[in-house]
Image (cartoon, grey):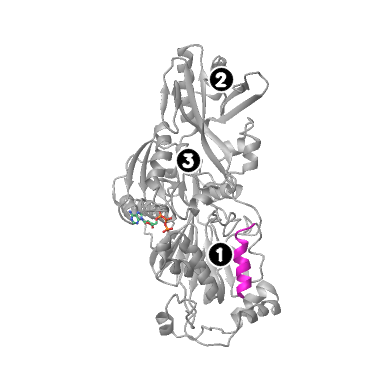
Amino acid sequence: MSTGRRRKHLSVLRGTKRKKKKKTPNAIQTQIRVLTGWHFKWTEVDKKNRDKKTVSVPVAEVIGVEEGRVEILPQKSVEDTDKDFTVFYVKRSSSGGSYGLLWRLGRTQFSCPSRVLRDQWIAHLRTAVKTHSPLRPHKLLVFINPFGGKKNGRQIYHSLAAPLFELADISSHVIVTERANQARDHILKKDLTGFDGVVCVGGDGMFSEILHGVIGRTQQEAGLCEHDPDVTLQPCPLHIGIIPAGSTDCVCHATVGVIDPVTSALHIIIGDSQPLDVCSVHHASALLRYSVSLVGYGFYGDVLAESEKHRWMGPLRYDYSGTMVFLSNRSYTGRVQYLPADPLFSSPRDKTRCLSGCGVCSRSTERLFPNSSDSGSLYSSYSGQISTDSDGEWVSVEGRFKCVSLTCMSSSCTRSPLGLSPSAHLADGTGDLILVWDTNPLGFLKFLHRHTSAQDQFDLPFVQVHRVKAVRFSLVEDGEEQVHEESAYEEERGYAESGGRNGSQQHLAQRSTGQVITKEEKTTTPLICGLCCKKAPDVSVWNCDGEILSVTDILCKIHGQLVRLYARGIEDGAVIHNCIQQGKDCKRTCTLER
Ligand SMILES: Nc1ncnc2c1ncn2[C@@H]1O[C@H](COP(=O)(O)OP(=O)(O)OP(=O)(O)O)[C@@H](O)[C@H]1O
């Protein structure tokens, strides 16, 4: 049915005034309903006709339309009346602390003059919902990690998400995991026919399992070898949904803006679709892991290794280990090579943020999938159409680092609201490489502390950030490796003397005095030694989205938009409040991602 026809037809479907059951002085009456192409609108007035408010809900954000007067939360109740119907929709509210918006289940009841008209309204609304959100899932495979976070994954799913899925007529097959990697193995081996998406109830570790399963399965089916870093991987047709229930829920925070199970469940229901870049990490000719949020050497590797020793502390172990590793003031030598991304498209220092409807990511979709007419819709249409940008020149730097980090997204979380790289994009086919050269403890503390505020953590003389397509890290070969024993203070003085950031890079690369470490020493030195240990370790470990890698020399390659999440990126609260909440049509937020 065309939009025009629908509008004409529905203009006769006027609702009559209906008082809400609760007769308070401010009781709300709903009046006049209109279903235009994109929006369902009605007017609410208080009893004395003083306060009039038009509510406009994008049809794509209608969760369900039910006969009678229905309530879902906290418990389902139905009053089956002939002339009433209830509309459930997405209602936004400020999240307080976080940057994003909380989504809640809005509910409005309407009365019609006759049952026939009521049934027409229900039928038209349901048809409109199907038309406007074609990616809504019908069947989901749900994995619950019962041991993630505060061990309340089961309760979170059954009390907050499942009733919403039921309301939206989504059937779900739920598996409560009994061991690590069960979800990954299930996705890799079992029949997934009929499933539109996989939902993970847990934290970042659980998400990573599902990510590996979904990517691996897709490549298996496409007959592609994941181990070859030069292979262009096939984008995954199964969407991934995240119901946050872990101790770290960084992927959820960076893609939704808030860590909230109800918000995430509503994004899943309406079939939001957020493409996501993925980094594959290789050693020699083997794939080690995939990562979306952090591949980090030095500080972040050491903190993870240290925290693994203190799992009994629960989430507190990260604070404890962070403090211990910071106090041990370590730095590591290495060679970093990177393939820069095209600076014309974006820069990690351009002070933009990747928000819902991001222009940089949309243009990247066109670049990555040039032959696809609707690059936001079906993955099947991507097959054989993926473009690979021509590679540029690799850049090589070496020296002593506090940390080397690569992230495919901002990696924002509650503690670091803007994240490791605030201007990183979710789906532009690039990652941000952050090099923190050795510096004094105070300088490094300043760098770390800036992650918790709006201050620019890259505006420090010992920090560099590059937008890249690939990164290689290697220990410097025997004979050429130089481990320098000057104090951190002298190191920083070197920066100043050699003229800032670029000069420092040259300065570090050119120094040629110091003690040479043999390979034997490297491998026999313990990875982590506490504050009490006199000799600092010479080699750190890689932290790959919370997993320790067993090797040091790695190659990382970014795969643009390899997977899709049931999310839409972080919504710009200011824009949303000014349009949807106040009843104005907002083409930007309502249409871009569809
Ligand atoms: N039934 C299970 N028993 C043990 N481990 C499991 C089980 N199910 C999943 N896991 C593993 O538990 C790890 C952590 O899970 P998750 O990310 O959900 O919780 P978390 O509390 O955020 O974890 P973290 O310990 O990383 O902070 C994952 O790597 C996952 O593979």
Amino acid type shown at disc 2: Lys
Left or right placement of residue 427 versus residue 524 in this view: right
12 or 44: nearer the viewer: 44
**Is residue 473 shown in magenta?**
no
Q: Pointer 3 and pointer 1: residues touching (CB < 8 Å)?
A: no
Amino acid type shown at disc 1: Leu
Work out whether 512 lies above or below 120: below
Q: Main secondary structure of the magenta part?
A: helix
Q: Give the residue displayed 60% in from the left and 84% down from the top.
A: 486
The Cα–Cα distance between marks 2 and 1, rounded to whole angstroms, is 60 Å
First in sequence, mark 2 or 1: give its number: 2
The Cα–Cα distance between marks 3 and 1, rounded to whole angstroms, is 33 Å
Residue 584 - label: none
Q: Is mark 3 within 8 Å of ligand 1?
A: no
First in sequence, mark 3 or 1: give its number: 3
First in sequence, mark 2 or 3: give its number: 2
Q: Which residue is mark 3?
A: 262
Left or right placement of residue 197 versus residue 97 in this view: left
Work out whether 185 lies above or below 110: below
Q: Give the residue displayed 52% in from the left and 34% down from the top.
A: 90
Task: Say if residue 414 shows up in the picture.
Answer: yes
Which one is closest to the eye, mark 2 or mark 1?
2
Residue 23 - label: 2
Within 10 Å of disc 2 (Cα), the crowding (few <14, some 14-19, many 20+) is few
Q: What range of the chain is rendered magenta?
A: 439-453
The percent position of residue 257, horizontal first and vertical second, equals 55, 48
Within 10 Å of disc 1 (Cα), the crowding (few <14, some 14-19, many 20+) is many
The percent position of residue 239, horizontal first and vertical second, equals 43, 45
Q: Which residue is mark 1?
A: 433
The Cα–Cα distance between marks 2 and 3, rounded to whole angstroms, is 29 Å
The answer to which quarter of the image holds residue 547 is bottom left
